[in-house]
Image (cartoon, helix red, strand yellow):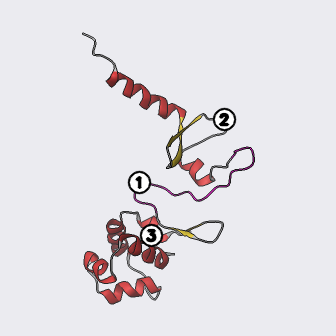
Amino acid sequence: MLKDNLLMLRGIHGYSQEEIAGKIGISRQAYAKWESGATVPDVEKCSRLAQVYGTTVDGLLKTEELDDGSVLPPAPKGKNIWGAVTMNERGQIVIPKAARDHFDLRAGQRLVLVSEDNEGFALVPAEIFEQKLALISRFLSPAEG
């Protein structure tokens, strides 16, 4: 819900209500009403809020809840948080439908698992990974002359 996201984002960014209000051109009291859920901003103000917080209007309005009831903060613009998945005893996970649809993933599609030590991992469609690898290889190859 918008009010929850506003509270979370303001805390994450370390802003006071007064600082945010100043950045979007409203009074602190008006912003406080948004955080309390007493009122909601118009579309233009939502757009300004999204810009200040580095997210999207859609991200401001939607609430992503995990299985344990905790709420995820809105993802930064251009990034996504698809929620939590549970790995079974065979190491299998189910990629959330919204993520499969967003990336047009299909059954049988090859994915490359990449990671950074102690940071987690990511799945990349094999064709994209291979294209990027080929591009890097061209830059690393000695110039033909």
For disc 1, the neighbor class at 10 Å (few under 14, some 14 to 19, many from 20) is: few
Q: Which mark is residue 108?
A: 2
Image quadrant where one finds the C terminus? top left
36 to the left or right of 145: right
Q: Which mark is drawn over residue 78?
A: 1
Q: Vertical placement of 46 versus 33: above or below?
A: above
Q: Is residue 64 left or right of residue 143?
A: right
Q: In whole angstroms, how far apart are the C-alphas of marks 2 and 3?
A: 34 Å
Q: Amino acid at mark 3?
A: Leu
Q: Residue at x 26, y 75 (%)?
A: 23
Which structural element holds mark 2? Answer: loop
Q: Residue at x 35, y 22 (%)?
A: 138
| Residue beneath the point at 39% across and 79% down | 41
Callout 2 amino acid: Gly
N-terminal label among 3 and 1: 3
Of label 2 and label 3, which has the lower sequence position? 3
- Residue drawn at x 34%, y 19% is 141
Closer to the camera in the image, 71 or 36: 71
Whole-percent x and y of residue 53? Answer: 36, 67
Q: Which mark is residue 59?
A: none
Secondary structure under badge 3? helix
Of the numbered discs 2 and 1, the one sitting upstream in the chain is 1
Query: Which span is picked out in magenta?
Result: 75-92
Circle 2 packing at 10 Å, graded few (<14), some (14-19), many (20+), is few
**Whole-percent x and y of residue 54?**
36, 63
Give how far apart the Cα atoms at labels 3 and 1 are: 14 Å
Secondary structure found at label 1: loop
Q: Which mark is residue 60?
A: 3
Residue 104 placement (x, y as % from top left): 56, 43
Residue 117 lies in the magenta stretch: no
Q: What is the distance, in whole Å, between disc 2 and disc 1 at their CAs?
A: 27 Å
Dot 2 and dot 3 residues touching (CB under 8 Å): no
